[in-house]
């Protein structure tokens, strides 16, 4: 796989979690995670199913392969026997790029084996070793898989305002005033650049934050609902299930296992 000209550094990577453990049954469906995931399975037969539109692609995951899954990619996974499951979850910040909704597969050759062995030889979570593996894989992604995000300082300002006010109701008028635009002009430009209405994008940000809190915090469902701007637990559960198929409780149980 050719190396990309896009350069990442350790400062661009925020590690969320790392695990390596034995799993009797690795079977999960309808996943779409708000972060990047590295997967490598050993000592068993496993496969991953990637969904695109109405079609589905099945990928065998032998010990000789390692896969990198970007955020928001729809996938399911399955193993027909117990496996040793290695995975790292992380996010990228500071680089204004989007990546195609696809997966990237790498041969488990000597360099990758050395990087993973370095991680496993540490008794505790070693962020520097994990970041070395993350950076190595990211820097192998073809440049054609990335596309620059379209920028408009007014829309950037409104999105920043949304991200810092997820627990507050924001109308198009509020956001348009923040961007120093008319309401209609703001709504039209936002949809043209982002592909969603401001309301739809706010909902996406709230669900996205809720997903992270459900997996990586011990906060109660009520607390997460409040922090993400939902009026109550019922409203949160209804909105979350509409978006993720699962309830917040079901999602938390699922993602804490994978």
Image: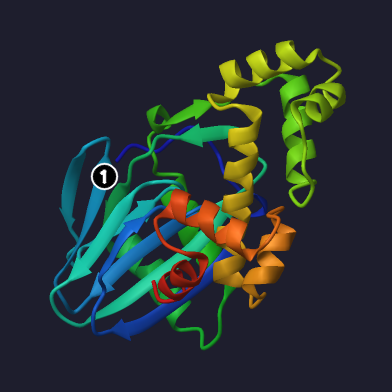
Q: Is residue 251 above or below residue 169?
A: below
- The N terminus sits in image quarter: top left
Left or right placement of residue 162 versus residue 174 in this view? left
Q: Position of residue 228 (x, y in %)?
A: 69, 55
**By what rule are the colours in the image chosen?**
rainbow
Q: Determine the image quadrant of residue 205.
A: top right
- Is any part of residue 128 visible from this angle? no
Q: Residue at x 34, y 64 (%)?
A: 39
Residue, disc 1: 51
x%, y% of residue 102?
33, 41
Quarter of the image containing the C terminus?
bottom left
Q: Residue 43, located in which quarter of the rendered image? A: bottom left
User: Is residue 197 found left or right of 258 in the rendered image?
Assistant: right
**Residue farthest bottom in this picture:** 123
Name the residue: 60% across, 26% down. 197
- Asked which secondary structure carries label 1, the reply is strand
**Residue 229 appears in the figure:** yes
Q: Position of residue 191 (x, y in %)?
A: 59, 20
Q: Is residue 98 above or below residue 107?
A: above
Q: Pick the residue in front: 253 or 50.
A: 253
Q: How many marks?
A: 1
Q: Residue at x 39, y 44 (%)?
A: 140
Q: Residues within 10 Å of mark 1 (few under 14, many from 20)?
A: some
Residue nearest the observer in this picture, 82 or 204? 204
Query: In this rendering, would 227 be left or right of 199?
Result: right
Which residue is more in the foreground, 152 or 211?
211
- Residue 114 vs 197, above or below: the answer is below
């Amino acid at each position: 796989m050719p190396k990309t000209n896009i350069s990442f550094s350790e400062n661009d990577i925020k590690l969320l979690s790392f695990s390596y453990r034995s799993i009797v049954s690795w079977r999960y469906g309808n996943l779409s995670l708000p972060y990047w995931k590295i997967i490598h399975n050993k000592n068993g037969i496993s496969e991953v199913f990637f969904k695109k539109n109405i079609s589905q692609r099945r990928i065998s995951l032998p010990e000789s392969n390692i896969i990198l899954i970007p955020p928001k990619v729809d996938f399911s996974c399955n193993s027909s026997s117990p496996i040793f499951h290695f995975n790292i979850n992380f996010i990228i910040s500071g680089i204004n790029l989007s990546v195609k909704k696809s997966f990237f597969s790498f041969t488990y050759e000597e360099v990758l084996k050395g990087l993973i062995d370095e991680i496993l030889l540490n008794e505790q979570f070693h962020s520097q070793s994990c970041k070395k593996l993350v950076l190595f894989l990211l820097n192998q992604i073809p440049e054609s898989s990335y596309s620059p995000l379209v920028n408009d300082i007014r829309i950037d300002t409104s999105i920043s305002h949304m991200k810092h006010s997820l627990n507050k109701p924001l109308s198009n008028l509020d956001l348009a005033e923040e961007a120093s635009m008319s309401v209609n002009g703001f709504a039209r430009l936002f949809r043209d650049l982002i592909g969603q209405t401001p309301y739809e994008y706010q909902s996406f940000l709230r669900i996205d934050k809720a997903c992270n809190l459900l997996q990586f915090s011990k906060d109660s469902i009520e607390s997460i609902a409040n922090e993400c701007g939902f009026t109550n637990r019922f409203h949160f559960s209804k909105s979350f299930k509409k978006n993720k198929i699962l309830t917040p409780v079901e999602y938390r149980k699922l993602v804490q296992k994978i």
